[in-house]
Amino acid sequence: MGENVTKYVFVTGGVVSSLGKGIASASLGSILEARGLTVTFVKLDPYLNVDPGTMNPIQHGEVFVTADGAETDLDLGHYERFVRVTLSKSNNFTAGKIYANVLRKERKGEYLGGTVQVIPHVTDEIKLSIKKSTENYDIAIIEIGGTVGDIESLPFLEAIRQMRIELGSRQTLFIHLALVPYIKTAGEIKTKPVQHSVKELRTIGIQPDILICRSEKPLQQDAVDKIALFTNVEKRGVISLPDRDSIYDIPMLLDEQKLDDLVIEKLELLAGPADLSEWRSVVDAEKNPEKEIKVAMVGKYSGIADCYKSLTEAIRHAGIKTKTKINIIYIDAEDIEKNGIEVLSRQNIQGIVVPGGFGKRGIEGMIIASQYAREKMIPYLGICLGLQIAVIEYARHIAKLENANSTEFDSDTPYPVIALVTEWQDVITGKKQKRDAHSDLGGTMRLGNQISRLKENSLTQKIYGKLDIQERHRHRYEVNQTLLSQLIEAGLIISGTTKTAENQELVEMIELNNHPWFIGCQFHPEFTSTPRYGHPLFESFIKACVAHQTKMP
């Protein structure tokens, strides 16, 4: 273990966004953890939204939900998948949240009538937020979103510059991740973008201690020498991070270049050698599958992989655990609406996943996909919206509730099998929550860990191996209690429930008796899946898909 004082590693990015700062930060954290250090993370996002809860997934990617119900940046998902840490609302701060805190203090008179300014008030709030969130850890990795040069990120960069002055170089470390592009027509890499990115950092008073260079191919020594010379970074501090087939290989790649040694040396920490055997086992299982299947993901954000990042990773984790190569086929539900079930049936798939989402677009296509899975005995996993889709489909075609729907999609449906629950009690905190159709969209859902009781001897209970489970939620609509008896009479099995403030039972999980594997869950199990441990629900689903493949003609 290190000294009883938190050391800070600040990770910035340059040239372009989406280079993988989150994965690089998480990978570094995993190596430091493997050396016996306690690690935590904070993600600082420059946008003015209070949180990403109301942002379009196509623009921003998925919303990751923490155990305590915070809607956060997707990078927190990377952190939890790579490091044994459970993060919370205090591990993700947006500019909107910081400014809201500052303005709240101003309204209360905490600044004693002084003029409120970016420096010192906003920067002080950023520093305070970082320090409060990272107490009692050996190392805190602080990732600043966006790229250097963005006007929005300047207060965050100024705050971490001040922290270096206040805490010194033995307690703070700057890592800058930037692109080294490969120009095919010239047949060479170009170091100038990295040089300019570091120059931009230095103009605001930050000299990086370490550079992580993202590129298509590994950097040659002459490129490393040139980058070190022109950026004032020692040669051993220039780390090459080329494209890899698996993100779970990155801890080994960084360890090979002794990035962790350099971090520990500069921060004067005491740590043992890194034991990365678990990560080597993960990569080995992923690279050497024994079988191969195709799974269709029928959603409404199919064009951008980051929209379902945790879900696609959870499916990969199940593949790692079962030594199965899983080819995920992304299908836009609107394509099924326009062109029929052939869009799905011609794919020769062994399983269907309908993920979460909001809004009416593509709903009928998802219902068609759910009906196809039920009738063709194809394994089906419905997550959040996917459960609601399965209930609507079952209500229409089995319970004969014509035009059954959710009030989210059709407020005049004669059979609102999915509807808004206006009042419920958080089982863990005991707080009563209220909401209605006019509530703010942000932060008004059933969020975070909830306790569910599983039906004894159900398939779901056998999968989990216990009766009470905790999973993370992010939804506003529920299965309507007033119509539930008709669905149960028609054969729908309610295999998991949660009690409300009025002692009603909200539906958490459903399954079908006369089907090899058909399960819907109102929560998001993907948020707790990790590459080292997987998740029992996804692992069981993939095993069912493999079994279905063996029965196919």
Image (cartoon, rainbow, N blue to C red):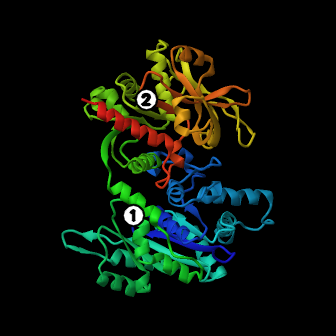
Residue sitting at 65 percent across and 38 percent down?
451
Position in image of residue 542 (x %, y %) = 40, 40
Query: Which label is found at residue 363?
Result: 2
Residue sitting at 33 percent across and 35 percent down?
350
* Pointer 2 local density, CA inside 10 Å: few below 14, some 14–19, many at least 20: many
Q: Is residue 230 above or below residue 154?
A: below
> Observer-nearest residue: 212 or 444?
212
> Mark 2 or mark 1: which is in front?
1
Q: Is residue 503 above or below residue 246?
A: above
Residue sitting at 54 percent across and 23 percent down?
493
Position in image of residue 130 (x %, y %) = 64, 66
Q: Secondary structure at mark 1?
A: helix
Q: Which residue is mark 1?
A: 249
Q: Amino acid at mark 2?
A: Ile
> Observer-nearest residue: 159 or 152?
159
Asked if labels 1 and 2 touch by Cβ distance under 8 angstroms, the answer is no
Q: Closer to the N terminus: mark 2 or mark 1?
A: 1
Q: Which residue lies most toward the left here?
A: 185
> Observer-nearest residue: 50 or 389?
389
> Observer-nearest residue: 397 or 47?
397
Q: Amino acid at mark 1?
A: Asp
Q: Is residue 345 above or below residue 317?
A: above
Position in image of residue 156 (x %, y %) = 58, 68
- Image quarter hosting the C terminus: top left
